[in-house]
Image (cartoon, grey):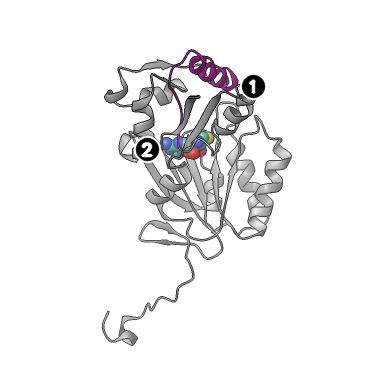
Amino acid sequence: MKNKIYVVGMGPGKEEMMTQEAIYAMEQADVIIGYTVYLGLLGERFRDKELLSTPMRQETERCELCFAEAEKGKKVAMICSGDAGIYGMASLMYEIGKKYPDIELEVIPGITAANSGAAVLGAPLNHDFCVISLSDLLTPWEKIEKRLLAAAQGDFAIVLYNPSSHKRKDYLKRACDILLQEIEETRPCGYVENIGRENTMAATCTLKELRETQVNMFTTVFIGNSGSEIINGKLITKRGYQVERNTDICGNN
Ligand code: SAH
């Protein structure tokens, strides 16, 4: 039997938003490894597990720690917020895993911020969409700019991850300036902070207003496509169905 590491997407935060499979994987584990903030979000039921962490920016060390623990014969669950394969640790685990052919990896999917945030805002991603991270820690900013412009030119709805950090306070503004080269100022947008956690906050606005908005690193930003609308305070990107709006013509509702 190969030692196994579960690479678990825990969803945005609260247990109700984890899959049964994610909960099962963590219950099976002897040790749960993850960034401290995510370990802190785990409920009481995992308190008896050994919990191990490395600080932010020490992602490689965190992954190495998983393999070291698995080599000792422990069942390991490495947890990531949202989905582990969306700006998470899943790919790095496979890269490092090359050195450990006897350890098997299994990725357990989780609800990513694009999904959970979209649900809070309404239905902003109900047509083709692009997901772009504004973090230039691992991606050159020029490439991010190119992707933003291409997404705008393609009339995709757009989700922005990592819209801000302590060192990158003006990145959302810079991204909006690029989008505004292609997109009108009145384009409906929205953002959600602390999805599935305490103090969830959501707002809709125009692209011009988004440019002036200071968001934090626990925020996911949504930009509608050319057909998106704010309907009853919700950000909606339409599928394209014909909807009869005039009840008089219909006769009855
Ligand atoms: N693997 C994660 C993404 C990690 S990148 C996922 O699939 O969701 C970190 C970025 O994800 C944050 O900067 C933010 O843009 C977004 N994010 C993750 N969790 C969030 C939450 N609970 N509320 C709002 N945004 C979140």
Dot 1 corresponds to which residue? Answer: 99
Asked which quadrant contains residue 8, the reply is top left
Residue found 55% across the figure and 26% down from its top: 166
- Mark 2 / mark 1, whichever is N-terminal: 2
Q: Secondary structure at mark 1?
A: loop
Q: Amino acid at mark 1?
A: Lys
Question: Is there CB contact under 8 Å for labels 2 and 1?
Answer: no
Q: Visible in this render: residue 214?
A: no
* Magenta span includes 85: no
Q: CA distance from mark 2 to mark 1?
A: 27 Å
Crowd band around label 2 with a 10 angstrom C-alpha radius: few (<14), some (14–19), many (20+): some
Q: Nearer the viewer, residue 110 or 98?
A: 98
Which label is found at residue 3? Answer: none
x%, y% of residue 10?
41, 34
- Amino acid type of the residue that numbered disc 2 sits on in the rendered structure: Glu
Disc 1 residue crowd, few under 14, some 14–19, many 20+, Cα 10 Å: few
Rendered residue at 35%/34% (across/down): 197
Residue 14 to residue 239: above or below: above
List the single residue furthest toward the top.
Answer: 72
Taking the view exactly as shown, the residue that stands out farthest to the right is 142
Camera-side residue of 238 and 182: 238
Residue plotted at (31% across, 81% down): 247
User: Which residue carries the number 2 mark?
Assistant: 21
Residue 253 x %, y %? 27, 79
x and y percentages locating residue 177 in the rendered image: 65, 47
Q: Position of residue 37 (x, y in %)?
A: 42, 23
Stretch of the chain drawn in magenta: 56-82
Judge from the rendering whether residue 131 lies leftward or rightward of residue 229; answer left or right: right
